[in-house]
Image: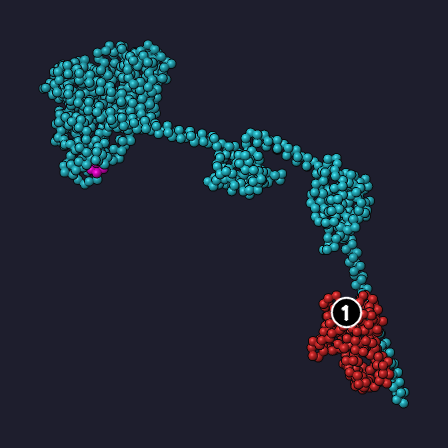
Chain colours: A red, B cyan
Amino acid sequence: MVFTSFLDLVEEKFGYEMVDRILLSCDLPSKGVYTSVGTYEHSEMVQLVTALSKETQVPVSDLLKTYGNYFFPILSNGYPQFITEAPSALDLLERIEHHIHVEVIKLYPDAELPRFDTRRIDAQTLELVYHSKRKMADFAEGLILSTFEHYKEQAQIEREDITEDGSVVRFVIRKA
Amino acid sequence: MSEIEILKRRVERELRARKEAERILEDKAQELYLANNSLRVLNENLELRISERTVDLTAEQMRLSALITNLDSGILLEDERRHIVIVNQLFCTLFHIPAPPQFLIGTDCSNSAELSKSLFAEPDAFVQRINEILHKRELVLNESLSLANGQIYQRTFIPLFDGQRYLGHLWKYNDVSEAVHAGEELRRSEDKYRGIIENMELGLMEVDNQGRIVRPYPRFCQMVGYEPEELEGQDAVEILLPPEFISVLDRQTEDRMEGKAGVYEIQLRKKDGSLIWAMISGAPIVDLAGDIVGSIGIHYDVTRQKLLQQELEEARKRAEAAQEAEKQFLANMSHEIRTPLNAIIGMAHLLADTNPTEEQTEYLGILKSSAEMLRILISDVLDLSKIRAGKMETQAKDFDLPDLIRSMVKSLQLRIEDKPIKVLLDIDPKIKNLVTGDDLLLHQIMANLLGNAEKFTANGEIKVQVAQETEPETHPLWIRISVSDTGIGIPPEKHDLIFQSFRQVDGDTKRKFGGTGLGLAITKQLVDLQGGTIELISELGAGAQFIVRLPYIDSGVIPISDKLMEAKQSLHTHGKRILVVEDNYMNRKYIGTLLRKWNVEHEFAFNGREAVEKTQEWVYDLILMDIQMPEMDGYEATIAIRNQEGPNQSIPILALTASAMMSQKDKAFSAGMDDYLSKPFKPSQLFEKMAFYMGAGDVSNEPHVPEIFTFDARLDQQMLYALYGDDLDYAHEMFDMFLNTAAVEFREIRPKVETENWLELARLAHKLKPSFGMVGLCSLEKMMDRIETDAKTDPNPDALKLDLLQAEQYFEEGCLVVQSELHRIGRILKK
C-alpha cells in the first residue's frame, strides 16, 4: 500500500509520465509491479524517492514529508476504527506502537515497522522517539502533521536527530 | 509514440500487478483455510475438555453441596450479586424460612437482612452490621448475636476471591445458646465457690503455663498489697517471689505440669517490699480438651503462725540451753563438792588410825557416817543427772554375779545384825559361769534395793533370791533378782510414783525415813538402761517385793577369784615407786598418808608439767594423775608422757577424776590413761586399783581396818561371825588347823573316786564336811554333803568325777583365801 500510494501521489502531482520515468530509471527487483496487498523491499522505496528527487529537483526530505501528509487520509479511510478510538492527535500518536502496529503485523506478518517510544511530559506535551533502519523520520513527520490537521488541532513540533544517520529521531510535540 | 508506449507499459504493469495481487490473495486464502481448519480442531478439543471439566465440577459441586447441606451449621453461599448459590436446611431453620432450601437457589438476598431482622434483639444493629460486613469484605469469625427470644447465634463470614476478583461470600450461623448458657452456669457456679474461698481469707490466683498471672482475685491482691491491674499479665515469680524460694516453686511447677496438686509454704514479697509467709495449695487447671493450661493457687497467710513458730523455736532453744547449763552446773558441782568431801572422808579414816580416845572414835564415827551419807546423796543426784544427760553408759565385762550378790548381802547382814531381821539369800546353783554385763550398775541397783529394804524394815526378814530364768548359754541370759522385805509396804496406787524422781510415798515417809527419794528412780533408770525390767509387788503394811530382770550373756567362763590372782602377784612385787600428780594439798596429804602407811615409795608432782619433767628423770611403776590442774592438766600431761621415749612411756596411769561425767572418763582413756578412780575414794578402792596395776607390794600392806574385823567376802561371813565373833585368836587357831589337817585329808578323796571305793569316799566326805564349815567354805561343805549322799545311795562314777573336779577347784581357791585370812588375822593379833 505504501508503494501504490506513493506512485498514486507521483502520478497525481507530476503525471504518469513521471511515474514511468522513475520506474524505468530504477533497477527494481519487482520491476515496478506493486499491489496494495504485497510487501516489497524498502530499498526499492529509497530508489524511487531518490529518482523522483533527481527528476523534480525537490529534496528527498520534502518529498517524504509530502508523502506522509498524503498518506494519512489513506490510512484514516482504510482503517477508520483506529481514528475513532483515539479522541485526540496526541492519543492517536501514543497508540501507534502498542495498538496500531500490533494490528498491522496481524495483516502483514512480513511488514517491517518503525518503533515509536512515547512519553507524556505533561498533558499537552508528548515526547516521541522514532527508531528505524529505514531512516524515514521525514515521512513520520509528515504523518504527524497530517494527524493534527485531521483532528483540527494546532501543534508545535521540535525535531532532534539523536543519531547522525537519522535512524533515531526525537520529536517533542507540544499541543497549542 | 512515447505516450502510447508509456500507456502500454502502464497497462502491462497494471495487468501484472493484478495477476500478482490475485496470486497473493490466493495464497492468503489457502493460508486462511488451513488456519481455519486447525482452529476447528482446537475448538473441538476445547469443547471436549470443557464438558469433562463440567462433569467433574458438577460432581464436586454436588459433593460440596451435600457437605454444606449436612453441616452442623447454617450455611448460606451467595455470589457477587448476592444471589443464593447454596443454602442448607439448618440455615432456613435458624432464620425461620419456611421454603425448602433448594427452591431458594438463585434468589436475590439484597433485602434478606431487612426481612429477618425482627428475629434479633437489636434489629437495626443487625442490618447495619450485615451491610458493614458486606462492604468491608473481610473475614469475620464467631461473632455473637443475641436473639429477641434469648437464643444466641454465632456468625462467621468468609469472603471469596479469585485473585482480585470478588466471587461472593459464605455466611455460617450456629446456635450456641446451650453452650453459652451452660458456660454461664458453670462460671456462676465457679464464681460461687471462688467467692466462698475468697470469704474464707484464702487468696486465689491463676497463672498460665508460662507463670504469667491470668486472674488475681481480690483477696489475694489485698494479701500482697497490689491492685488487680498491677498483677494481671505479670510474671508471678518476678513480681512476688523472693529468689530463695524459686527452687521450691520450680518443683511445684513441675508437679503441676504432671497434673499433680501440692501444698507448700513460701514467702511472698508485698508491694511495699515486706515479706509474708503463705501456705499455698496449688492445683493444675485443665481445659475441656484435658490439656493443662495453667495452675490455680489458694494462698493462706501464715505469717503470724510462722512468727509464733519461730518464737517457740527460740524458746525451746533457750530452754535447752538452760537445761544444758543445769547439767554443766551439776557436773561442776560434782567436782567442787567431791574434792573437799574426799578429803573429809579420807582424813576421817586417817584420824581413826591415830589411836583416838573412845569419845573421839565416837565423833569420828558420826563424822564418817555423815560424810558417807552426804557422798551417797551427791552420788544419787549426780547419777540421775548423768542418766538424764544420756552420759551413763553400760560396760560389758565378765563378772561373777552370785559372788557380787553374796558379798553385798553379807555386808547387809553385818550392818543390821543388831536389828531383829533375818537375812536370807537363795542363789540358783544353775548360775555357774561368769556373766557378761555391767557389774557396777548391778552393784548400784542392789545397793539401792537392799538399802531400801533395810530402811523400811523394822523387823522380820529380808530375802534375796537370784534365779536364772533361761537355760545356760542362751542369749540373752535372763537373771531374775528378787528383794523382798517385811517392811511397811507401799499401797498399790503409789507403785508407779516411787519410780519417779524426787517422789516418795508421802511427805511423812520423807520425814520419818529421810533420803533423797531418788534411789528407786535411779534404780529403775539403771535397769532400763540395761534393757531390763523392774516390778513391785506390795501392799500397805504387807512388805514389799522388788523383782528385777536383767539380760546378760553367758560368758562360758568358770569364775576364778581376782583377789587370788592379786595375792599370787603380790608375792613378787616389792619396791615399787609411785608418782602422785595432784595440786590439791588435802588430797596430796590423804594419798600420801595412805601410801606411807602401805609402805609404798612415792613422789609428788604439783601439776602436769612437773609430772612430765619428773618422768623424764626417774623411773616409776604407776602414776596417779589428777585431771584438773594449773599449768598443764592431766590429759595433756598423759599425752606428753605417752609421746616421750623412755622407760615411762607405757607406764600405767590412773586418772583421779572429780567429775562423774562419762565423757571425762572417755577423754581420759583417749588421752592414754589406763583406768580411773572417781573421787572421793575409799582407801580400799585405791589399794585395789594399785594392786591390779602394780601388785600391792605385799598382802601385809593391805589397809588395816580396825573397827570390825570383816572376813573375806568369799567366805561365809555370817557363819564365821557367828562362830568366832570378836575372838580372832580362836579363828586364827581354827584356820591354821584347817590348813594343816583338812587340807591334807582332802587330797585323799581323789584315789577313792578313782578306785570307786564308795564306802571310803562317803566316810571321808562326811569327816571333811564340818571342817569346811569351820572356815566358812560353805560351798565345799555342801559339796561334801552331796558326795557323801551320792556315794552312799547312787554312786555314778562319771558324775562323782565331775563333782570332784569342781570340788578340787573350789578347794584350791578356798585354801588360798583361808591362808590369806590366816595371815591377816595373825597380823591383827600381833598388834
Q: Quadrant of the N terminus of chain B?
A: bottom right
Left or right: B562 as drawn, with respect to B27? left
Relative horizontal placement of residue B9, taking residue B121 as reference (left or right): right
Question: Where does the magenta region start and end?
Answer: B637-642
Q: Is residue B457 left or right of residue B592?
A: right
The secondary structure type at the circle numbered 1 is strand
Q: Quadrant of residue B356?
A: top left
The residue most toward the front is: A176
Query: Is B793 situated left or right of B32 in this image?
Result: left
What amino acid is labelled 1 in the image? Answer: Lys
Residue B721 lies, in percent from the top left, at 18, 14
Location of mark 1 (residue): A175
Q: Nearer the viewer, residue B381 or B25?
A: B381
Identify whether B206 is placed above or below B361.
Answer: below
User: Is residue B98 depicted above or below B338 in this figure?
Assistant: below
Q: Note whether residue B787 is visible.
A: no
Q: Is residue B87 magenta?
A: no
Residue, x 77% and y 58% (percent of image)?
Answer: B49
Q: How many marks?
A: 1
Q: Quadrant of the C terminus of chain B?
A: top left
Please state which of residues B813 and B243 is positioned toward the viewer in this rendering: B243
